Amino acid sequence: MPRERLSVVVTRRLPDVVETRMSELFDVQLRTDDAPMSKLQLTEAMKYADVLVPTVTDVIDAGMLASAGPQLKLIASYGAGIDHVDVATARQRGILVSNTPGVVTEDTADMTMALILSVTRRIPEGLALMQSGSWTGWAPTALLGGRVGGRRLGILGMGRIGQAVARRAKAFGMQIHYHNRKRLRPEVETELEATYWESLDQMIARMDIVSVNCPHTPSTFHLMNARRLKLMKPSAVIVNTSRGEVVDENALTRMLRSGELAGAGLDVFERGISINPRLRELNNVVLLPHMGSATEEGRIEQGEKVLINIKTFDDGHRPPDLVVPSML
């Protein structure tokens, strides 16, 4: 007699090829629209699903896990971030948590460089001028930005994405500096021509551009707070493609408005879609709707990792991308 298929609930629309394959393998409940599930809908799904496939915007807290059914044994998250799931409580309740690391590295690094160039070369201002039809022609002093070659780039968080940013920035002729919990191996530093700073304060005070590429954890919340932002040079630029909570958004907005910082490029925000309206008004700021990982190839690869994690679990083995306490 064939074994009963796993009951899988997916919280958002995924690429068609991923949904099709998931339907072939499991008893899957897919979303018919692309709206996020409410907290109540998520809680209800956890009462009957064997596997939940949430995304990084689905917050799963201790209370929701406490009301989960005994059959829920795996939360196979679609995305690399894991701060939206209370992993410790899940483990206490015998629920495994997996994610999809490494897939968005190159895509996010590409977007980091795009933001650096957009801010320093004033690309959105030029685009707005052309779209409004108000451009009157080339002028020697119009829309003057700054060249990135020779500038000091300080990378906060030198994991996969930080190193991918370093490789790209090196090709642009930038000087690579970094701060990380652990110093890179000497051969990696040599390859990237990267200078390590044990003191974050000392590094950011000397950088022309700071790129935030560290995860959001309790220890990185507001790591770039008002005090640290004030250490940056008035001519400096900050770019964040990691997690909005790492930067104090209100303090950043005040400094950009007062001219204490030259510019910012942000793909993530501290309060999700609730962005400080004053931040949106500034012409020295480039804001993107969390699209750093938004490539067709990346989204499909993420889905394939989710499928492998669930299938491996279904076969009685440990999911390859299992989140363990040492990662938190």
Image (cartoon, rainbow, N blue to C red):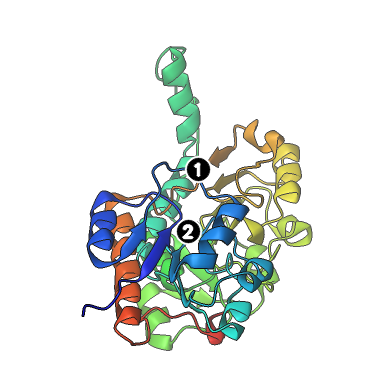
Relative to 255, say whether 134 is above or below: above
Look at label 2 and name its amino acid.
Thr
Q: Quadrant of residue 312?
A: bottom left
Picture quarter with the N terminus: bottom left
Distance, label 1 to label 2, CA atoms, is 16 Å
Task: Name the amino acid type tagged 1.
Answer: Pro
Rendering quarter of residue 88: bottom right
* Label 1: few (<14), some (14–19) or many (≥20) C-alpha neighbours in 10 Å: few
Residue at the spot 34% in from the left edge and 73% down from the top edge? 310
Tell which of 78 and 204 is nearer to you: 78
Choose mark 1 or mark 2, whichever is in front. Answer: 2
Say if 5 sits above or below 56 in the image: below
Q: Residue at x 53, y 81 (%)?
A: 327
The earlier-in-sequence mark between 1 and 2 is 2
Check the image and report above or below for 31 versus 58: above
Of residues 227 and 319, the one nearer the viewer is: 319
As drawn, 132 above or below 197: above
* Dot 2: element: loop
Q: Which residue lies under the disc numbered 1? A: 289
| Residue placed most toward the observer, 19 or 281 | 19
Tell me the crowding category of disc 2: few under 14, some 14 to 19, or many 20 or more residues within 10 angstroms, Cα based: many
User: Residue 154: x percent and y percent?
Assistant: 55, 64
- At 55% from the left and 72% from the top, the residue drawn is 69
Is residue 300 shown to the viewer in this render?
A: yes
Give the residue at mark 2. 55
- The answer to whether residue 173 is visible is no
Q: What x and y, as percent, mark residue 53?
A: 43, 63
Query: Residue 157 occupies which quadrant of the picture?
Result: bottom right
